[in-house]
Image (tube, grey):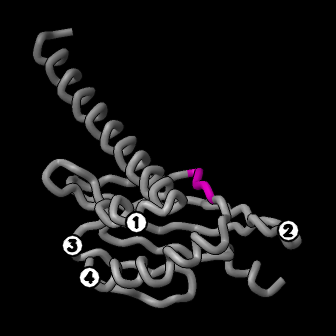
């Protein structure tokens, strides 16, 4: 193997490592966001968003821009979390990078503090992310529950 071949392989490996690091940073962003929401740290949660964030949460409709999304989170989501005391977690992340943007989808599970049968709800996050000054942020967050849609009919 020539020096040029080795240099080419090193360059390709460096690129792959950077991609994997970005994917891991996005996973951390999402987990931290959910931690902040669960812990009622809404200033920190809202810092996870770009200025042009688009939020489509459950059946509340679409909110656009940091000001409108902040108002919605502070007036609606905060009260829902504070009253319900439900816990939730995400998993099965699928993230695709495209330079300084990315897309991802996640399964999420909400465990109900005051259980009814079944005592939990399954949903899905579909998100877009943008790297801003070297830091990943949500540019679109869409959370739907229940998911898949056929659960609504049963």
Residue at numbered disc 2: 118
- Closer to the chain start, of discs 1 and 3, is 1
Q: Where, by quadrant of the figure, is residue 81 drawn?
A: bottom right
Q: Quadrant of the C terminus?
A: bottom right
Mark 4 to mark 2 CA distance (whole Å)? 36 Å
Mark 1 to mark 3 CA distance (whole Å)? 15 Å
Please tell me whether residue 85 is drawn above or below residue 94 in the rendered image. Answer: below
Q: Residues within 10 Å of mark 1 (few under 14, many from 20)?
A: some
Residue at numbered disc 3: 51
Mark 3 to mark 4 CA distance (whole Å)? 8 Å
In magenta segment, residue 47: no
- Closer to the chain start, of discs 3 and 2, is 3
SS state under label 3 = strand
Q: Where, by quadrant of the figure, is residue 87 drawn?
A: bottom right
- Closer to the chain start, of discs 3 and 4, is 3
Tell me, yes or no, whether the two marked residues, 4 and 2, touch with CB atoms within 8 Å. no
Tell me, yes or no, whether the two marked residues, 2 and 1, touch with CB atoms within 8 Å. no
Residue at numbered disc 4: 67
Q: Residues within 10 Å of mark 4 (few under 14, many from 20)?
A: few
* Residue farthest along the right direction in this orientation: 117
Q: Quadrant of the N terminus?
A: top left
Mark 3 to mark 2 CA distance (whole Å)? 38 Å
Tell me, yes or no, whether the two marked residues, 3 and 4, touch with CB atoms within 8 Å. no
Tell me, yes or no, whether the two marked residues, 1 and 3, touch with CB atoms within 8 Å. no
Camera-nearest label, 4 or 2: 4
Residue at 34 percent of width and 64 percent of height? 43
- Closer to the chain start, of discs 4 and 2, is 4
- Closer to the chain start, of discs 1 and 4, is 1
Residues in magenta?
88-92
Q: Position of residue 132 (x, y in %)?
A: 17, 57
């Amino acid at each position: 193997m020539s020096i040029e071949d080795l240099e080419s392989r090193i360059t390709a490996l460096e690129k792959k490592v950077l991609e994997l690091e970005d994917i891991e940073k996005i996973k951390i962003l999402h987990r931290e966001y959910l931690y902040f929401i669960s812990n009622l740290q809404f200033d920190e949660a809202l810092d996870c968003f770009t200025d042009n964030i688009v939020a489509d949460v459950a059946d509340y409709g679409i909110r656009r821009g940091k000001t409108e999304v902040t108002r919605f989170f502070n007036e609606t989501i905060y009260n829902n979390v504070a009253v319900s005391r439900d816990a939730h977690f995400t998993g099965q992340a699928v993230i695709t990078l495209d330079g300084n943007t990315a897309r991802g989808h996640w399964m999420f599970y909400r465990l109900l503090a005051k259980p009814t049968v079944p005592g939990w709800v399954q949903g899905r996050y579909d998100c877009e992310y943008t790297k801003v000054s070297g830091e990943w942020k949500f540019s679109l967050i869409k959370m739907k529950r229940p998911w898949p849609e056929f659960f609504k009919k049963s």
